[in-house]
Each structure stands twice: as structure tokens, then as C-alpha cells.
Amino acid sequence: MKFFIDTANIEEIKEINSWGILSGVTTNPSLIAKNGGVFEDVVEEITSIVDGPISAEVISTDLENILKEARALSKISKNIVVKIPIIEDGLKAVSILSKEGIKTNVTLVFSLSQALLAANAGATYVSPFMGRLDDIGKSGIEVVKDIQNAFLKYDYDTQIIAASIRHTSHVELVAKAGADIATIPYKIFKDMIKHDLTDKGLEKFLEDFKNVKTKGDLK
Ligand code: G3P
């Protein structure tokens, strides 16, 4: 399973990218607003840091303007993926853009029906929102599993980006379900690397090694 980072914060992207584990970045209008700066400049800077798919979202809701925004965003870099909400004009736009070779990420997906519509329109990615489903008493992982099973059964090329991830268990659950990608907030990456037994084990190794003689190249 590939890891994307779900943020528009340049420092967070640089730090996690330096781990050598990042395949892409997803943003949304809220994350862009939280980060500040000029939208197109922030997106362009992100494309200069991570060499992989970078999702940037349209804010129009009518076909003509979704297409206008999508085409403008796609000109920023070959790695731009245009994020489009699953609404009627959004679906029409995905169909048109996919024929133009513009990659799309259909967002705000909360059901298998929505994911199937997006896949049939030619979406490159669909983003089911796990955390927000859990928030309303539904099961985010069940929706991801349903989409995964249907896409395998019908051999769709559309990839699943498990989004709205709130804790490390979400990451592990989507990996077990076989999702293609998890887009993960900065804090969750920091949680993923931590384990109390790792800290304790390392402390003991370093303590035990203190009196060992070495030839000098080692500390
Ligand atoms: O970027 C889309 C999604 O990951 C948002 O997550 O935490 O705002 O529900 P959240």
C-alpha cells in the first residue's frame, strides 16, 4: 500500500518526504486555507518536493467552471491530480477530463454507489472518507472494503485512496482490506513510527553497548 500525506503544510511534507516513504500528496480547500498562501503557488511548491501524484481540489460546482479550474490546475505540473467532489456536474467533468488525459481524484465519497459512479466516469482515484463515516456511526472500513471488492470484481482501473484517516488503526485496517493508497495526516505518520517497546529496546541496547570496545570508526 502506498502512502500519501494529507496536508498543504510545506514543512510537514518536507519532513515526511525525507523519510523516503511518500508517494504523493492530497490537499483539500480546508487544508489549503489552514496553511495560508496563494493556492496555485502552494500547489506548485508541493509538486517541486514530492515526485508523485499531487491532488488539488476545484472549488466550483458547475460543469463549465469545474472544467476551467481543472484544466488550469493540470497545467501547473504533470503530477497534478484534479480533485472533484462527487456531484452531478463533477461526474460529468471527470468523464470529460479523463478523455483529455487529465487525472482525477473523486472526493467526498461515502458509499459504494458513489465510488462506482466515479469509476464508470473514468476517475483515476476515489477517496472514501473513513473518519467522517465513523463520526456518523457508520463504518468507514466497511465502505472501503465494499469498494475494494467491487473494483476487483469488475476489474476497474480506478485506485482507492483511503482518506479522512484519524488514527493508526485506520491505516492498518485499510492495508488489510487491500486499498491501493492511504492518505495520512502528518500526526498519524508520527504515531505510526512510535512503539513503547522500540523506545525501551533501543534504550537498553545503547546502555548495554556503553562499555564495549570498538576500533574507533563507531561511536
Ligand atoms: O483530504 C480529505 C480527507 O482526508 C479529509 O479528512 O480529517 O478532514 O475528515 P478529515
Image (cartoon, helix red, strand yellow):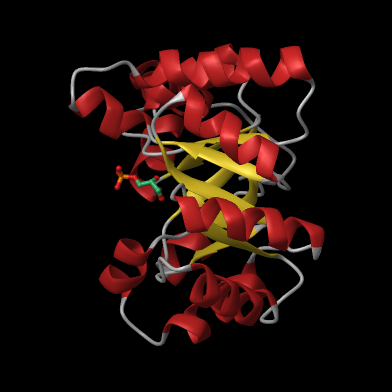
In the picture shown, does residue 127 fall above or below 32? above
Residue 141 in view of the camera: yes
Q: In this view, does 125 lie to the left or right of 28?
A: right
Count of all numbered marks drawn on residues in the image? 0
Residue at image position (50%, 58%) is 89
Give the quadrant of residue 122.
Answer: top right
At 25% from the left edge and 23% from the top edge, which residue is drawn? 134
Q: Is the N terminus in the top left, top right, bottom left or bottom right quadrant? A: top right
Please indicate whether residue 168 sits to the left or right of residue 177 in the image: left
170 w.r.t. 5: above or below: above
Image position, residue 71 (x, y; %): 65, 77
Q: What residue sits 59% from the left and 72% below the top?
A: 67
The C terminus, quarter of image: top right
Q: Who is closer to the viewer here, 208 or 148?
A: 148
From the viewer's perspective, tell me whether residue 86 is left or right of residue 32: right
Q: 12 or 31: which is nearer to us?
A: 31
Nearer the observer, 3 or 98: 98
User: How far across and down, in percent of the image, does residue 157 sit?
Assistant: 78, 34
Residue 195 appears in the picture as rendered: no
Question: What percent of the width, then of the height, locates residue 135?
Answer: 19, 28
Where residue 7 appears, x then y in whole percent? 41, 58
Residue at x 67%, y 57% (from the top left corner): 53
